[in-house]
Structure formats: C-alpha cells, structure tokens
C-alpha cells in the first residue's frame, strides 16, 4: 500500500551581513519555488515584491545579486516539516523602533519560540540555543527582554500567508559563489539546521547545544574548502572565519567589493554607481569592453555623470497616449464590412480556423451561415466567428487574420499608462565596440483595469518597474528605437494578463516584443552579444504592424 508523502514547507533564505539566514516573504518564496521547479536560471525578485526591484537570484549559483552594485550574498532553499510555523502561516514578530512597525523573527528563531509556546512554557531564553541571541521571550505578557540591558519590547504571534508546500523535498543548502579570487563551492551539510526542525516534531528545545557542535563541524568544512581554493589559487582573497557562528564567510574577510549584505536600491535609476574595484562591469574609456567573461549577469552600465548623458539624435520621446472617445469608436459591423467581403457560395470545403467547425455549417455562436473573406489575404471565416474574435480583443478598429497574421487597420494594444524615456550612455555593449549604448527606461505603476482589459474594474500589478533595456547606438539600433517609440504610442510594448514566469494573473507583462535587459553580459539570454537580436526584434515589430 502506497504511503502518502507528507507536505513540507519550502522557505527561501538569504544570508545577511550579520552571518544569519533571513527568510524572504512567502510571496517571494512562491516566485522562487515556481522558477526552481521550471529549471529557470535567473529570477527578478521585483516580480513578487516591489521593494526588491533591484535584486535578482541566480538559481544555478544560489546567490542573490544586487543589480545596482553587483554585490552578492548566498541563498538557500530550506525545508521545514508540515507542522512548522512556516507551513502553518505563523509569524512571530517584535515591535520595532518606530511606533506601529513590527519586525519578523528569522524562521529558525521563530521555530524555537513556537516550539516553546506550543509546550505551554512561560518563557524561552534564546541565548541557550542560538549564539548571539541574548533575548528572553515571555509568553504571558508577550514581551522580549534583552538579557544584557533589560530593555523590553512587545512581541506578537500572527497568522499570514503560508510558505509554498511541496512533497518529498530536500534542502538545497550548498553555498556556491564565484568571487574575484576564484570559484568556491562549500558543501554545507544538512545537519546545520536539524535542531531547527526538532522543535516542531518532538517539542524538544534541549538539543540546541548539541546542534552547535554540528555547526562547529560545518565551520571546519568551510575552512577546509577555503584552504583548498587558496592553495590552488594563491591570488584568491577569500577566506572563511570560524568565529561567526560557523555558518558563513565573515564579511570582513571578503574582497572589498563583495560584501554579503546587498546595497540598498538607488532611487536615481538613470545613474547607477558601479562598485569600486569590480572588474566585472568596468568598461574602458574608449568604449572597449574587457575580454574577461563575466560570471554573473551585469544589468547596469558603469556610473555615468549627468553631464555625459546625451539625447538620441533625431528621435523624439513618445507622445502622450490618450484613449479614443467612445463616440468615435467604430462599430463591430463597420469593422467587419471595412476589411472583408461577404461570399455568396456556401460549399467551401474548409474549416473555420476560429471555431474549428466546417464552413458548410453555421457558426456555433449563433448558427449564422454567412461567410466572409478578408480583403488582402482572402482567408475565409464565419462572419459571426470573426465578430467574436474582434470582441475578445482591444476593440480598437483593427483586425488581424488568425491564419497569416496580416493586420487590417492600425493595431493598438491594452498597455496601461506609463512612461518611456531613453538617452545615450558613453559605454559599449558586448559585440559593439566603439559604439555608445541607448538606455531605455520603461515605468508603469499599478492601477485599475479598464474596459479593454481582461478583468475590467479589477486592480492590476506592475512588478519589476522601472525596467531598463539596451540597444547599440548603430543605424539599425536607432531604427529599432524609432519603431519601439511607435509601438509604445500604440500601447503594444506591454499588456495585462498572466505572467509566464510567475503565473500571477492581472499583472503587466511583456507583449511579444523582446528586449535586452542585461547590459554587460548574456547569462540570462536577455543580453549581448546576440548578432541576430536586432533583426529578430524588427520581425517581431512587423508582426505587430509596426514598420517605417
């Protein structure tokens, strides 16, 4: 008899500058888990959490990367039992320094607190189980006391969104980073957090001290791995410290440009400073890119002063797009009559590609037997089927043949309002030495769907904005930019629907016109060099009815 596997909670965590693992919110964990299941290499965290717009996670290397500075920190996928707080959507929080602001305890700490709470204990002294946590949590007054200073804060236990639940999962607890000194793979054994799980299953909080012995063993593993790399590459500047709870490299021993804590996002997104000493995104003043192949995505150009940002000659910013007034909208029948002709014959031995029924029978929508042929391509459909296809679209006065994609009229989309800006930066893209780069910035805010959208009057999200894209400042690159401006004015760059990467409905997504979002690499497939990109995007623009 088959035994059903128990559900387990998956918590995605990143390592902070204090050498402790910190959990992503459940929404971000859902995004990362879906991407991990699909085998994706790179995930933009801004697709799930606006405050993380400038951070990405490399699922191949298991590192979080700051898109602005290039700094990184380890990431791990941690499994917790079905009855754990993470699986049940329980959060323990302490009152922050600002009134009304609550901070989450780390998942591992919350496991200890919840375990003691479920046992009916009056308090738990966290310093006995977690090195560096000199706090006692009292459950009757729901307070936290600093064991050293006596300072008291309020704590609370709340229910929220549960973390992703899976079956038969295993910890992904290797830390793999590529630093300037060489590639380091530190195999962190799963035992380093077994004491975190014992609380939920056995209700015991006395195994913490034994767990610290395991952590010391993990420290030795890390130190040996670092020593091996040091011996094989004497120039490596990476070392491991055994004095920081045995969990990670000490930030003080890392190269200056590789601090573990990611830098905060810069609000001035036109100019993003490059980290000092970073060879990965240094470009020579004469526009020649370095020969070294980057080991992780480079999303941003080097810092450029405002005085060096130039407009793109001969290309004006897009016009403000306004919706057509309802009184000027063309009726459905007028659109059908304008772009098609009615057929008198009825014995057409073909199927209607819209309804997939034979053309010798009436339309399944209303049993109307009338047939029409589009004027230029002569493809034949039920008139009623063509009307239903038009109703399901933006209803903007255009038709597009579902067979050959020929466009009749001017195609417009359902892109929400926003802004498109662009300028030149004096740095070259890989594959285009000697040419400046066209930097495009799209920005769209969340809002309410209009009548042309899939779910009118419902809110839509806008993840990962502003979005930064790049073109070479060549003749063909400027041609693509001119057409992208026209596509923006026709509301065709973005659409509202279901995200293909996260599965989130009612969100702003790309609309089948590919853009390059990596400046100095092509690790995710959205960068340079790519000799065919400009020709491919011109073809995509033509399919949208955009041409010179």
Image (cartoon, rainbow, N blue to C red):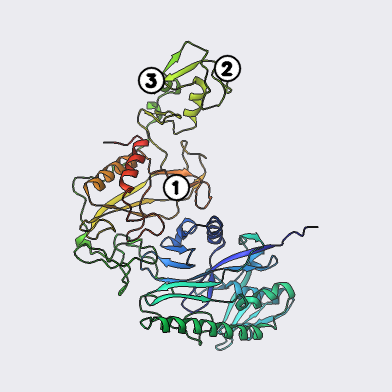
| Residue 435 appears in the rendering | yes
Q: Quadrant of residue 424?
A: bottom left
* Residue 349, x across and y down, in percent: 52, 17
Of residue 105 and residue 436, the one placed in the foreground of this image is 436
| Between 85 and 445, the one nearer to me in the picture | 85
Few, some or many residues within 10 Å of mark 1 (<14, 14–19, 20+): many
Q: Badge 1 is on which residue?
A: 509
Q: Residue at x 42, y 67 (%)?
A: 65
Name the residue beneath numbered marker 3: 375
Residue 319 higher or lower than 37, as above or below: above
**Residue 120 % position (x, y):** 74, 76
Q: Which of 103 and 390 lies nearest the eye of the viewer?
A: 390
**Mark 3 in CB contact with mark 1 (< 8 angstroms):** no
Numbered circle sitting on residue 159: none
- CB of mark 2 within 8 Å of CB of mark 1? no
Label 2 Cα neighbours within 10 Å, binned few <14 / some 14-19 / many ≥20: some
Asked whether residue 321 appears in the rendered view, the answer is no
Question: Which residue is the site of mark 2?
Answer: 361
x, y percent for residue 18:
48, 79
């Amino acid at each position: 008899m088959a035994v059903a596997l128990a559900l387990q909670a998956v918590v995605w965590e990143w390592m902070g500058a204090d050498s402790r693992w910190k959990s992503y919110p459940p929404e971000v964990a859902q995004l990362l888990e879906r991407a991990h299941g699909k085998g994706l290499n790179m995930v933009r965290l801004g697709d799930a959490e606006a405050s993380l717009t400038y951070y990405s996670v490399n699922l191949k290397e298991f590192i979080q990367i700051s898109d602005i500075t290039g700094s990184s920190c380890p990431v791990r996928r941690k499994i917790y039992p079905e009855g754990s707080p993470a699986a049940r959507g329980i959060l323990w929080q302490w009152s922050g320094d600002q009134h009304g602001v609550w901070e989450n305890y780390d998942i591992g700490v919350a496991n200890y607190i919840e375990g003691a709470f479920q046992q009916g204990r009056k308090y738990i002294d966290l310093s006995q189980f977690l090195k560096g946590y000199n706090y006692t949590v009292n459950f009757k007054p729901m307070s936290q006391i600093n064991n050293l200073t006596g300072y008291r804060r309020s704590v609370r236990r709340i229910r929220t969104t549960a973390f992703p639940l899976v079956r038969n999962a295993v910890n992904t607890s290797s830390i793999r980073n590529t630093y300037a000194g060489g590639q380091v793979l530190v195999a962190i054994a799963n035992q380093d957090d077994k004491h975190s799980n014992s609380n939920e299953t056995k209700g015991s909080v006395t195994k913490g001290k034994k767990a610290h012995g395991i952590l010391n063993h993990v420290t030795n593993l890390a130190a040996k791995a670092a020593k091996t790399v040091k011996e094989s590459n004497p120039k490596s500047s990476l070392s491991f410290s055994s004095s920081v709870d045995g969990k990670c490299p000490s930030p003080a021993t890392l190269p200056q440009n590789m601090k573990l804590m990611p830098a905060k996002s810069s609000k001035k997104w036109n100019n993003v400073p490059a980290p000092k000493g970073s060879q990965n995104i240094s470009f020579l003043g004469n526009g020649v890119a370095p020969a070294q192949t980057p080991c992780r995505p480079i999303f941003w150009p080097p810092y450029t002063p405002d005085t060096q940002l130039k407009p793109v000659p001969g290309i004006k910013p897009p016009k403000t797009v306004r919706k057509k007034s309802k009184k000027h909208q063309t009726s459905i029948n007028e659109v059908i009559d304008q772009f098609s002709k009615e057929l008198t014959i009825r014995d057409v031995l073909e199927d209607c590609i819209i309804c997939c029924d034979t053309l010798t029978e009436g339309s399944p929508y209303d049993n109307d037997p009338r047939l029409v042929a589009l004027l230029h391509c002569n493809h034949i459909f039920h008139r009623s089927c063509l009307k239903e296809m038009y109703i399901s679209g933006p209803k903007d006065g255009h038709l597009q043949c579902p067979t050959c994609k020929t466009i009749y009229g001017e195609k417009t989309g359902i892109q929400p309002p926003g802004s498109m800006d662009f300028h030149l930066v004096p740095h070259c893209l890989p594959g285009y030495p000697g040419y400046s780069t066209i930097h495009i910035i799209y920005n769209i805010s969340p809002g309410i769907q209009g009548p042309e959208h899939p779910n009118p009057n419902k809110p839509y999200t806008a993840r990962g904005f502003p979005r930064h894209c790049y073109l070479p400042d060549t003749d063909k690159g400027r041609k693509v930019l001119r057409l992208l401006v026209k596509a923006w004015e026709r509301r065709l760059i973005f659409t509202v629907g279901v995200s293909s990467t996260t599965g989130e409905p009612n969100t702003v997504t790309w609309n089948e016109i590919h853009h390059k979002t990596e400046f100095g690499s092509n690790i995710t497939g959205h960068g340079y060099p790519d000799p065919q990109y400009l020709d491919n995007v011109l073809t995509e623009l033509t399919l949208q009815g955009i041409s010179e």
